[in-house]
Amino acid sequence: MEITWLGQSCFRIKTTHGIVITDPCGPDTGYTLVKLTARIVTVSHDHRDHNYVEGITGEFKVINRPGEYEINNILIFGIPTFHDAEHGQQRGKNVAYRIETDDLAICHLGDLGHPLSASLVEQLQNCDVLMIPVGGVYTINATTAAEIVRQLTPKVVIPMHYKTPQGKIELETVDRFLQETGAAAAVPQPKLNISRSSAPETTQVVLLDYPHETDAAQS
């Protein structure tokens, strides 16, 4: 499995059964989606930095609500959560996704805005790759994100939804999250290649770099 970060909460997950794109972000975010195709596109909530499905080409299935889905041997669970700590009263609902394929489980938390309940921990635990927002302002902050990492103990953690030089949305940088998780020395890498046999035994934070347009065009 190959995972590339395309800015904000958007990832390209290349599996043996097809490509999954999560939370495609619109051009007003400062990030650019270039010639992306997919079999499945997941959308955590209906904000333009997460639902820019018109940026994806070809025929694909959009999943944007809770439920259980199976498409071409890719199993997806949409788990209802909230975009804030007041049961959605401020920013509405959010869907976290658990994606199971290639003998791996990937959890994408979207714009989660609150700590995890015991029920959510049960539904999200035993994940191999956790994609978690860390930039605060509109989501959980670095401290809450670090606590969730400790609750779920995934094999790999990929921070998302934080301030970068390209991003136009005002968020906190990833630095505090890296400090909270003891990963301040993490070096950005262009993509993550992972399999069941290559997954680390203990939790590792992987910092993915936003690709240049030429890199994105090849993806």
Image (cartoon, rainbow, N blue to C red):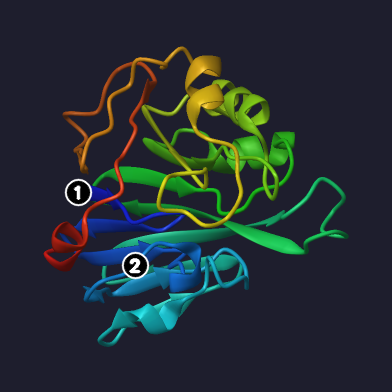
Q: Nearer the viewer, mark 1 or mark 2?
A: 2
Dot 1 lies on which element? strand
Query: How many residues crowd mark 1 within 10 Å: few (<14), some (14–19), many (20+)?
Result: some
Q: Amino acid at mark 2?
A: Thr
Which residue is outermost to the bottom?
59
Which residue is outermost to the top?
182
**Which of the pair 208/19 is nearer the observer?**
208
Residue plotted at (70% across, 37% down)? 116
Q: Amino acid at mark 1?
A: Glu
- Mark count: 2
Residue holding disc 2? 32
Residue holding disc 1? 2
Q: Quadrant of residue 154?
A: top left
Residue 133 locus on image (x, y percent): 55, 43
* Quarter in which the C terminus is drawn: bottom left
Q: In the visual, does 204 lie left or right of 143?
A: left
Res. 59 visible in picture: yes
Residue plotted at (82% across, 58% down)? 88
**Mark 1 in CB contact with mark 2 (< 8 angstroms):** no
Instruction: Say above or below: 213 vs 122.
Output: below
Q: Quadrant of residue 212?
A: bottom left
Q: Of marks 1 and 2, which one's residue comes earlier in the chain?
A: 1
**Which of the pair 94/80 is nearer the observer?**
94
Query: How many residues crowd mark 2 within 10 Å: few (<14), some (14–19), many (20+)?
Result: some
Residue plotted at (44% across, 62% down)? 30
Dot 2 lies on which element? loop
**Which of the pair 118/156 is nearer the observer?**
156
